[in-house]
Image (spheres, rainbow, N blue to C red):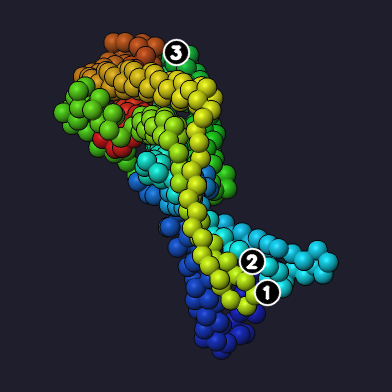
Amino acid sequence: MKCRALIEGVNEKSSHVPLLLIWIATLLSVLSVLAFPLLSQADDAPGATVQGLLEWADAHNPELAAMQYEVDAATARGESAGALADPMLRMELQDIDSNNPNLLPNKVGATKYTVLQSFPLWGKRELRRALAQTGTDEARGRKLAATAELHAQIKAAYARRFFTLHAYRLTAQLLELMRDLENIAQTRYANGLAPQQDVIRAQTEQTAMRIELVALESEQVQTQARLNALLSRPALAPLAEPQALRPLPPPAKLNADDLAQRARNANPRLLTQAAQIQSAGNNERLIVKNRYPDLTVGVSPVQRGERLDSWELMLEINLPLQQNARRHQEREAEAMLAAAQQREQAAVNQVLSELQEAAAGFEAVRRQEQLLKSTLVPQAGATLDSALASYQTGKVDFATLLDAQRGIRKARLDQLKAHVELEMRRSEIERLLGEDL
């Protein structure tokens, strides 16, 4: 009755339909305008490519921004390190009348104004400037190391997110295949050609695959939160769907000697160690230079009454007589330089060892991925086709067909895992190199 009343009401107001349509069109246009920024924001979300994620992190990560400020601070400190010290102004009131003391410069016997300026000699200013510059290099090396570490984590998280997404899709496809196998089993069971156990096995396998889909959904949320954390974004901020992993580098890029040389030239840790050696060396040379005196020059105009009566010139040097303390300082500087050199050698050995290990692992996974793609996956597919045809004709049992289905599933997942593992190994190599392959 209510539906009929509504229909009759609409018929009575049929003359107002054009006006109603105009209002609906206007409302839809307004909603589309309001929704456009939201769609644009979704389209602008990072995550489609790993390069876009890296650029986002470089522009928005607060830790990298803080380290850049430290580099700027060290640079500014280096600019001022070689500057002369501020001059000193001294005023002396002489011949003050003890019976009628007056401290005005023109009311005493004489007033001497002295301007003093110290001049470090023997290249000490240049060494101080060089010492401060190595501080800038160290700060820049620490920033490069933090950037390389962050980039490696982002690349690995992107690869993991790519894996969970495509593993979910692959499992969903195989679940459809499993439903088809269940239908075949039910048909054969209905015709008395197969036991009911075949249908139950098919249903049990589907349940296990649905459980795996739930786990993959949860892992997608976790990888999204991990990636957003690396990007300094809210955990549930939208991310674009990962499009594809980067193309594999040619084998020539993984030459052991070339990788070692590139690491020596660009690895952030080795660059920082080299800066520390340079700093220790400059500090040692500066302490040795302290054996020699510095010069202080002073100029003194002397006022008597209302006029400048005379001028005085002063030269002053410090006497570096505390040789025992200075020798201890020099030995300390030598020990610090030797320690920095030993640390650099240890860092070189560790970086090159890790680099060769990562390169060997990359090459092994590459060969595995090629074998999976060219041999095992086609073989598993052929096995499944043969088992399916044989089961339909009653030549094999359902357990054989189920094993074939599990075989193709495992082979394709292993191929996907190897493809993602290559990207993770590559990101580790690039972290050690300090640059992309």
Q: Answer with mark 2 or mark 3, whichever residue precedes in sequence.
A: 2
Q: Where residue 111 is drawn, which disc sits there?
A: 2
Q: Which residue is mark 1?
A: 106
Of all residues, the one furthest to the right in this rendering is: 99
Of all residues, the one furthest to the bottom in this rendering is: 15
Q: Residues within 10 Å of mark 3 (few under 14, many from 20)?
A: some
CA separation in Å, label 2 and label 3: 121 Å
Instruction: Name the side, left or right, on which 3 lies relative to 192.
Output: right
Give percent across and percent down for residue 87: 53, 57
Q: Nearer the viewer, residue 221 or 67?
A: 67
Disc 1 is placed on an element classified as: helix
Instruction: Name the side, left or right, on which 361 lies relative to 93.
Output: left
Quarter of the image containing the C terminus? top left
Q: Quadrant of residue 165?
A: top left
Residue depth check, mark 2 versus mark 3: number of the one nearer the observer: 2
Instruction: State the residue at coordinates (52%, 22%).
Output: 324
- Callout 1, which amino acid? Asn
Disc 3 is placed on an element classified as: loop
The number of numbered discs placed on residues in the rendered structure image is 3
Q: Answer with mark 3 or mark 1, whichever residue precedes in sequence.
A: 1
Give percent across and percent down for residue 427: 35, 32
Q: Which residue is mark 3?
A: 195
- Callout 3, which amino acid? Pro
Residue 160 seen anywhere in this rendered image of the structure: no
Instruction: Name the side, left or right, on which 345 lies relative to 332.
Output: left
